[in-house]
Amino acid sequence: MSEKTLGIIGGSGLYDLPGLEDRKTVEVETPFGKPSDVLVTGSLHGVRMAFLPRHGRGHRLSPSELPFRANIYAMKELGMSAVVGISAVGSMKIDLRPGELVLVDQFIDRTRGRTAESTFFGGGCVAHAHFADPIWEPLRQVALRAARAAGAVAHDGGTYLCMEGPLFSTRAESRLYRSWGVDVIGMTNLQEAKLAREAEIAYSTVALVTDYDCWHEVEGDVDVAAVLSVLKANADLAQRTVVELARAVGEMEEPISAAGCMEHAVMTAPDKISADARRRLQLLIGKYLG
């Protein structure tokens, strides 16, 4: 039986993953710079795991400053075949309440200025990944069951609108996004999903609802104090979900894997791929570079 692996990228309010056996702290250097922080590795329910706090311990990095490429590359370097991003989000629908989880399956990109951090390609090698379904569905289904096993009210599916930040939405923006039918709004997970696909890593998001953004006519407008209050109350729910997720992955007959999804994505002729691009991409998709 193949080794089971699972990476966790913790969002706002989740800066550590207690309970790991054989716990080690690992510094990873990548061709794309340093990750957000040192990673913690260990095992849980027979699954080899790696944990990274997205914003760094102490929440040092804003969404626009995140080294998305280095974070995903580090997960690949540590051998993670599946990664789950845990993220605080605002709700755009009345029935998605603070404290509940949404296992999203689609994204809309409203970020600006993140082009370099949204792809491993360019600079000597062009590739176009298939991205119609940005979440790896087998992993999402496992995460959904794990969240419910942990006692969460977990919603099956939804669209995550990824905005630039760091400010929250204006009221006009919030109402516009609601008119599009989106379910939640956040600032981070789309870039992770894009890069995970390019790295042949199965990726899914567990979105923790903290507020109703500013569209709601009765609830107060979103503010940091309210968000932190919900995050604190639900930090152990997120951790319980991770424990149940590791248990479920450990019980599977085969590991979840996105291997092969980039097989036909590289467009650049092998003899035209630059030496620097080969160096950067070797770990990720070297077998397709010719």
Image: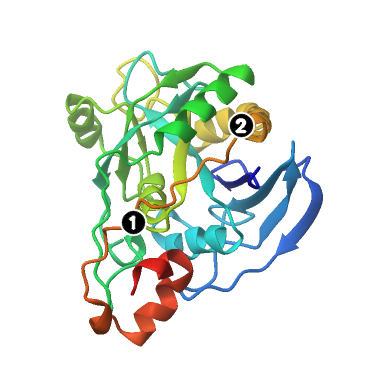
Image coordinates of residue 267 in percent, x first then y, are 21, 67
> Which mark, by number, is residue 140?
none
Is residue 118 visible to the viewer in this orientation of the structure? yes
Q: Position of residue 43 (x, y in %)?
A: 74, 46
Coloration mode: rainbow
- In the image: residue 126, left or right of residue 102: left
**Residue under the point 53% across and 29% down:** 143
Q: Where is residue 232 shown, x and y percent of the image? A: 63, 32
Amino acid carrying label 2: it is: Met
Of the pair 204 and 97, the residue shown nearer to us: 204
Task: Say above or below: 45 vs 154.
Answer: below
Which disc, if any, is residue 262? Answer: 1
Quarter of the N terminus within the rendering: top right
Q: Reply above or below: 22 against 71.
A: above
Q: Quadrant of the C terminus?
A: bottom left
Identify which residue is drawn at 32% across, 43% down. Answer: 162
Residue count near mark 1 (Cα–Cα under 10 Å), binned few <14, some 14–19, many ≥20: some
Residue drawn at x 30%, y 17% is 217
Query: Which residue of the protein is positioned furthest toward the right in this rendering?
Result: 22
Pick whichever, 129 or 59, lies toward us. 129
Q: 130 or 164: which is nearer to us?
A: 130
Would you name the residue on which mark 2 appears? 252
Task: Tell me: 247 left or right of 8.
Answer: right
269 lies above or below 210? below
- Find residue 283 and report its horizontal and vertical position in percent: 48, 69
Give the residue type that dot 1 points to.
Answer: Met
